[in-house]
Image (cartoon, rainbow, N blue to C red):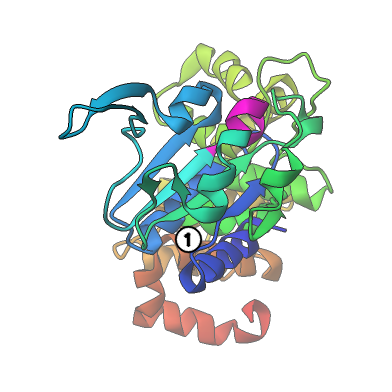
Amino acid sequence: MFYQDVKKTITAIITKYRDPVLVLGSPGIGKSAMMKEIATDLQFDSFIDIRGTTLRPPDIRGLMYLSTDKDGEKDAKFAKMSLMPRAGRHLILFDELPTCSQEVQAGLYQLILDRELGEYKVPEETVILAAGNHQEDRAGASRILTPLATRFKTILNLNSDLDNWLLWAIPFGIRPEIIAFLQLSQRHNENALNNFDPKSRDNSYACERSWKNASDILNCITGDTLRETLIGTIGTNAGESFSAFLAIYAEICKIPEIIANPDTYQIPTAPDQLFSISSALSYAADKSNLTAVLTYMDRMPSEFKTLFTVDISQRHGDLTETSVYCKFAAANAVTIN
C-alpha cells in the first residue's frame, strides 16, 4: 500500500476502534512522519514516540520496588514507565518494533492486546501504533514474535510511490529542483525517489526522508561543496545525477527573466528543461507575478500545463481562486482536466 492509502486506513481503524496497527516499510520511507501527521490531523493531546532500539525488559514492566501498606506489610511493585500517559487522549508509537529483543516483544503482549500492563491501564482515548523495518531490509530488524503480531488489528506494508509522496512534498515546500528531478526520473521509468538497497555499501541512499534532507541542504549550501554534501545525503548515484541536473536547472530556470518577458522568453524542447521550468514557476508564483507566469505557461506543451496546475494547486491553493488563474484554467480545460 502507498502512503495516503496507509494513512487513511490507520485513521479509519483508530477512529472507530482505537485498536493497534503495525506498519512495516523500508528505512526512511516515512513511517514515523505519517504517525506524527495522524496525531496532528486527529488532534491528539500528544504524540509519544518510543523507540524499540532503546527498550529493555524493565522499561516495559517497570523497575521493581518495595511498597509498605498501612499494616506495615511490604509488597514488591513495579514502577510505571514515565513515558506512558496516565490520562488524556494520546497517540503512542512503538517505533522500530522489530529491533526489540524477544524479551521486550513478549513484555508488550498484554499492553498491545489488553491495553494494560500489571497495574497500569492505557487511558481509554489513547491509541497505540507500531512501526518498523522489514527483516530483509537488514536494518537491525528481526522477526516479530507471532503472538505479538497477531495482537495488531492489521499489519500494513508501506511502499514507495512518487505520486503519493508528492501529495505531501509539494505543499510541505520541498524544493522545486527536487520535484522536477524526481518527475523526470519517473518519466524515464527510474525510481529515484527510493533506491534503498540492503546490499549496498554506500553510507547513504535516496529515500523519502533523505530527499527532505536534500531540500534543506539546497536552502543553505551552495558552491563547490554542494555536490559532495548531496552525495552524503542521498548517496553516490542519486547525488551525482541530481548535481548534474542542478546545472541544467540553474541555466534554464531564470525566473526573473521569464517573468519579465513571458511572451518572448524561449520555450525549451528537452523534457528535463520543461520539467525544470514548470516546477520552478509553480514554486515562484505569487499574486504579483501570476499573470506573467500564466502567460508563459500558456505557451508550454499540454503535459507540462497539467503538471503545473497540479503543483500550483498544492503549493499555492489561494492562487487558483484568482480571476486570472480561473481564466487560464478555463482556456485550458480540455488539456488540464
Q: Position of residue 57 (x, y in %)?
A: 52, 24
Looking at the image, residue 38 lies above or below residue 257 = below
Image quarter where the C terminus lies is bottom right
Q: Which residues are magenta?
A: 95-105
Q: Which residue is mark 1?
A: 262
Q: Mark 1: which secondary structure? A: loop
Q: Residue furthest left?
A: 70
Q: Answer with the quarter of the image where residue 69 lies.
A: top left
Say which residue appears at 72% left-offset and 48% top-offset: 184
Looking at the image, residue 213 lies above or below residue 165 = above
Query: Is residue 280 shown to the viewer in this render?
Result: no
Q: Main secondary structure of the magenta part?
A: helix
Looking at the image, residue 110 lies above or below residue 217 = below
Q: Left or right of 294: which side holds 80?
A: left
Q: Position of residue 41 (x, y in %)?
A: 39, 62
Along the line of sight, which residue is nearer the eye, 113 or 99? 113
Q: Left or right of 37: which side holds 68?
A: left
Say which residue appears at 52% left-offset and 22% top-offset: 56
